[in-house]
Image: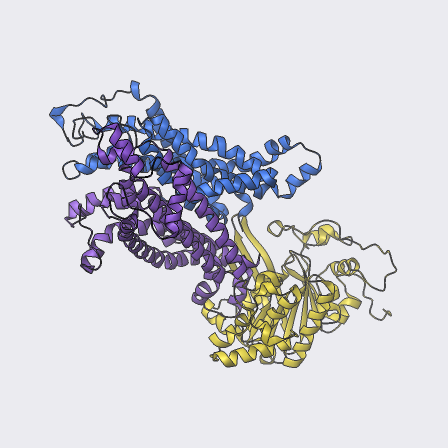
Amino acid sequence: MSQEQKLLVVKDLNTTFQTPAGPLPAVGGVSFDLNKNETLGIVGESGSGKTVLSRTIMGLQPRTNVTVSGSVLLNGFEVVGASEEEKRKIWGLQVAMVFQDPMTSLNPVTRVGKQIDEILRVRMGMDRQSAKARAIELLELVGIPSPSQRYRVFPGELSGGMRQRVVIATALAGSPQLLMADEPTTGLDVTIQAQILNLLEEIKERLKMSVVLVTHDLGVVATRTSRIIVMYAGRIVEIGSTREVFAHHRMPYTRALLDGSPKVSNPSHTRLMAIPGRPPNLQDLPPGCSFAPRCSYATDRCHQERPELEPSGAPGHFFACWNPLPTTRGVPA
Amino acid sequence: MSSSPLVREMIEDATVRDTPPRKRRLGILFWACVGWLILNLLAAILANVLPMKNPFFQDYAVVNASPSLHHLFGTDDLGRDIFSRVVFGSRVSIEVGLGAMFIGFGFGGPLGMLAAYRRGKFDTFLTTFMYIFLAFPAIIATIAVLSFWTPRSLLKIIVVVGIASVPIIYRVIRTATMNIATKDYVIAAKVQGATDRRILVKELLPNVAPIGVSFLLIGVATVITLEGSLAFLGLSVNPPTPSWGNMINESRAILQTNPWLAIFPSVAMCLFLLCLNFIGDRLRSHFDVTEVKL
Amino acid sequence: MARYLVRRLIMLLGIVFVITVGAFYLIHLLPGDPAVVILGTGDSPLNRAKLFAQLGLNKPIYEQYFVWMGNIIHGNLGTSFISQTPVWGTIKSALPIDLELMVISQILAFAAAIPLAMRSAKKPDGWLDRILSAGSFTLLSIPSFIAIVLLVLFVAIDLGVPHTGVSSYVGLSTDWIGNLESLSLPSFVLAVGSFVVYYRVLRSDLIATLQEEYITMARSKGISQRRILWRHALRPSSVALLGTAGVNIGGLLAGGFIVQYLLDIPGLGYTLISAIGLSDYLVVQGIVLVVCVGVILINFFFDFVINIVDPRISRE
């Protein structure tokens, strides 16, 4: 596929924060692309850089004390280095974000409907009536009952799940082609989580959008993404189609993540294997592979040299490890 | 431009959240202010032994003189040396400030803490009582009482102003204590069986103290300003005792001929107030580690 | 929301009631004999006693209170012993002056505070922010009387600008230009005092609000900075500002007397001070009552506005 047909092309993206204690490299050397109508999952623990990555991709990183290098091409538009004004042109209309905590991502003193149709009125020049009508349509689309009445409520009057639906509706208002969903279900009840994720999938199909789903929960990405990126300490450590990564992962960290999440197929009372140690301090990274201190497969080389992504053989599947898990290709799963 | 204590309290409440970490370090300006205050305090205490002119001596030969080597700040319309009057005048301000705050915090502090900690009927009753007083413009009450309670003395002023400040100190301390008393580590201490007394002294007091100290400084500043206002109504100490407020008031009549009587006490007072406010502000942001967002 | 407001109203009315009792007792407990003031000290004790009885001052205090309250309910605040004019008339002529001062000074204060606070919140620690912070801090430390004296010294005397004298306050109906001129200095001083407070509070709240997630969300919708500041950040940040404004304006009503006194503006504060000096009980009571009711109305008004701005308050 040619470049133009890919929705998103990220090359060697680095995001560094300037803190009083020195530079903090939150994201390093990230490269991947995204096609239209595809769902990509970005998985990692807290502090892995996944949220910073999702914001940087959009260009939504803080304006001060942050340096970004590399390239992010969204529909041919270069996000890195673009001015705030230029970025504003794509925000909401070509790419939108669904934030993690619906309690804090909606303005508590403005009515819900107004927040949804703001982009229609202010940026797309719709008049009030049409904008309101469209907002009510969107409320219906995200599955909120009695949408015309709900138009007038304040966020505080809605439950968590409803609020998140409103956030999604707001993100969709501008009909973006790319939706960044940053932990959209963390903090919601488990039952609601499934509903929201299903909703996202439905919408994605209907509106032919691409979705980037950022989460720490492997269960979330397992069935809903076509490809996933595993991040650790700001870098990609494994990337490939979801199936491939789940079944034939090579990087021990990925294995550890999988082992750490509960599976229905496990016999009851199976102990979850926690990863020993703690996530590294990004300002004080050890030389070599960032995961080495906690890795049970670590070799000397792992502690000295940082591994680059290398292909595993399967199409689109890459991993960064000197001592990868033995390939299970050819072995029945 | 000073505002009522109620307004000051609201400013303090509101400005808690905005200070970035950098500013939390006590800078050189902070210590400069501390130094200036100490200097003023020393000068006030040692006023009698310092080599200054007699503040009461009226030298008709040098009435309304401009500053010179003989009279550093010039003289007023009765020939009295302004410099020494300013130094002696600081006594009034300092005494009123410290004295009134002593009374205010002496009563308002413990009551506020107790009420916040105990809650219940004691708290409701006391707080309603105090809040009613808060609604009444304290300045007017102070003026009314001082107008009629003659003959005037510094002690009376201190007592009246001190009592008038109790409600607001009560409120500030009570609010601060309530914020802390609901924090988990206090409840944890209670669950562990600590006595009330122990909790008050070991958990609550150290955490309320910083807010208390910073409000204390602001309170002193407010009270000193109040003394100034009272002087303008003739309700401060009787002449010929010098006080900053008195002097500024006297200067109004001779403003055209002698600007010095207006300028020097004003500058002295403003500097003093500025230092107080600055230190109070810095201390508050220094201790408020929990509220800062990175 | 209506229930909340009604609750507040009842509470505030209760406070008014208690304050009137308190004020009444306070004033009557104070030494100072109106009969002496009226008749002078030279007159015979017998005459004084007669006057006392005539004025109804020999009845027990609580009876006097009820008489007074009874009159008030009928809209009669009494007639001053001293000046022999109805109290309400005195207040009526003084009140509009206070109102005018308040309106002008507050408009100036808000008109300056809101845009400047926004600029500073946009660029915290920028040069504007630093200058304004240092400046407002300094101004906050300057007592109003010093400000007036110094202003009069430098502006009026050094620059020869005409300033107020004994009867230089000019009524609005007489000459509106002269009116504005005579009120310019006191309005300015009051405005600066209020500005300093409003600026600080608003700036601090705006900075805190701008860190909220919903601001980032608005940014992600491609909304301009300007709109974000005015439409998204200002409303939630206004709560503290409005609360402070309520307290401040209430305080101005009562405490603006220093400014009035110094510049001979015959507003309520000025009248009150004179009345206290003359032991003019009824006037003092009347003014205290009016001021308290005024403060309560102001607080009530601001409660109402805060509720419109941030409906969460009444819901809690």
Q: Which of the pair A25/C293 is nearer the observer? A: C293
Front-lying residue, A95 or B58: B58
Determine whether C271 is above or below A60 in the image. above
For the view shown, which residue lies furthest in the top direction? B49
Residue A208: percent from left, percent from top: 64, 80
Q: Give the residue furthest to the left.
A: B61
Tint applied to chain B in the drawing? blue
Q: Relative to residue B192, is residue C238 depicted above or below?
A: below
**Is residue A84 among the parts visible in the rendering?**
yes
Q: What color is chain A drawn in?
A: yellow
Q: Number of numbered discs present?
A: 0
Q: Residue at x 29, y 49 (%)?
A: C189
Query: Relative to A234, is B197 above or below?
Result: above
Residue A183 in view in this figure: no
**Depicted B151 relative to depicted A256: above or below:** above
Query: Residue at the location (16% across, 27% down)?
Result: B78
C84 and A109: which is toward the camera: C84
Q: Position of residue B206 (x, y in %)?
A: 56, 34
* Residue B190 placement: quadrant: top right
Name the quarter where the C terminus of chain A is drawn. Answer: bottom right
Identify the image quadrant of the N terminus of chain A.
Answer: bottom right
Q: Looking at the picture, how far across and down is residue C45, in whole percent?
A: 26, 28
User: Taking A50 as reference, is B108 left or right?
Assistant: left
Residue C173: x and y in percent read 21, 60
Tell which of C265 and B208 is nearer to you.
C265
Q: Colour of chain C?
A: purple
- Colour basis: by chain
